[in-house]
Amino acid sequence: MKKSFTLFLTLLCAAGLFAADIDMQIHWGTKEAQQKSMTTAGKQKKYYTEDYSPENLRALSGDDLFGALNTLMGNTCRLLEDGYDYDALRFSYKEVDKDLNNSGNIIGYYDGQSMNGTWDGGTTYNREHTWPQSKGANKNTPMGYDMQSVRPANAAINSSRGSKAYGEGSQFYDPNEIAINNSLYAPEHLGSYRGDCARVILYDYVVYGEAGGHKNDFYLGNAQLLSKFGKNGIFESVGILLKWHMQDPSSLTEMVRNDGAQVYQGNRNPFIDYPELAIQMLKDKVTTYKVTVTGAEMWPAYSLTLNTGFISYMGTKNSRPAEVTVTGATSTYDKVSGRLTITNVKGEVKISVASTQALEMTEDGQKAIKTIHNGQIVIIKNGKAYSILGTPVGDIR
């Protein structure tokens, strides 16, 4: 009997029924998060194609980028078709806001609470309009029943927000003041709902707003973000909006529901998939600083930053870099997760990684290493660095 029971447990584990607890607020840039949602990369590849490929979108900025995203979102969103309304949301959250640790539960907005996903008339959870109904997201219009924007939230938590604008200080609603109610969300992963809120607001603007003459069939004039900053608006300022967005990258929770919302209504939130697009679109509204990266890839792939900085994840072809050098800002780097935190930006931010590539034989028969040093490719030989043309560039300490 004992042998049979052991075999039974082995089979269950092999089937993945005893999966390790998952921190769904872990940032998407971590390998752990990407391994938990294997379908996302495929969905992104199929969604962002041709004129709307990531490369083409990154080449745009300002109103041109707004126009491209506005067209893509409008062309793929199905909310003008029959069958979509405010009531329908209640019965669809179970397939969109999935708790990966409990198949019958959903994850609540603001506090990350795992809740029974079956609708019970609003006792357990109700529907939170990230962009408030009173400020444009009327529940009888697509903006008011958009799955990407209208989120399930604990009823009491939802009530505490009211229609306050997001921001920092007593006049605003700051999700960081809401206690996380999920024991699986580890503090070291820096999980927050600030970034989630910022990305939903950016989404609403690019789907339902207008800029530079660009607008789609969903436009009703209710999502003009740039005229709705301040305590009586939607967000404190464009600076705070982008700060929250950049200092709290997309999480596993957001990727899971981005996939689910696409299945539900056809479109994705591009600022979850490619966070760098937000600052590219709004760069003319704030002071920005250039970001350059040498020797590694970075996600999000920011080429611009605010003075408040950002969080990103570094990677080489096969691993996380052991060391990252940053000039132009204060930085901390966690080589285990690959997380790079940039603050106090003073000017152009240069990020370089010493990424050893291969041993090479020089003309004199000595072994040398090609690597990145102070942002340039060098050959290291006998403890000294030389440019690829052979010019000495200094000692390697």
Image (cartoon, helix red, strand yellow):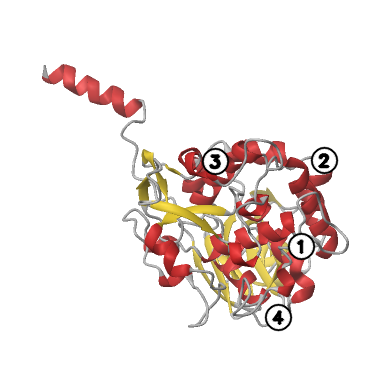
Other residues around mark 4 within 10 Å, as few (<14) / some (14–19) / many (≥20): some
Q: Which is more N-terminal, label 4 or label 2? A: 2
- Pick out the residue farthest to the right: 213
**Residue placed under numbered mark 2 in the picture:** 50
Kind of residue at badge 1: Gly
Q: CA distance from mark 2 to mark 4?
A: 35 Å
Q: CA distance from mark 1 to mark 4?
A: 37 Å
Residue type of the residue flagged with mark 4: Gly
Q: Residues within 10 Å of mark 1 (few under 14, many from 20)?
A: few
Q: Are marks 2 and 4 in contact (CB under 8 Å)?
A: no
Secondary structure category for the residue under label 3: helix
Residue 221, labelled with which disc?
Answer: 1
Mark closest to the chain's N terminus, 2 or 1: 2
Horizontal side of residue 379 vs 13, given as left or right: right
The residue nearer to you, when weighing 127 against 265, is 127
Residue located beneath label 4 in the image = 347
User: Secondary structure beneath disc 2?
Assistant: helix
* SS for callout 1: loop
57 over 262 or under it: above or below: below
- Left or right: 362 with respect to 243? right
Front-most of residues 41 and 92: 92
Between marks 3 and 1, how big is the CA–CA gap? 24 Å
Mark 3 burial class by Cα count in 10 Å: few <14, some 14-19, many 20+: few
How far apart are the two marked residues, 3 and 2, measured between alpha carbons? 33 Å
Q: Which mark is residue 88?
A: 3
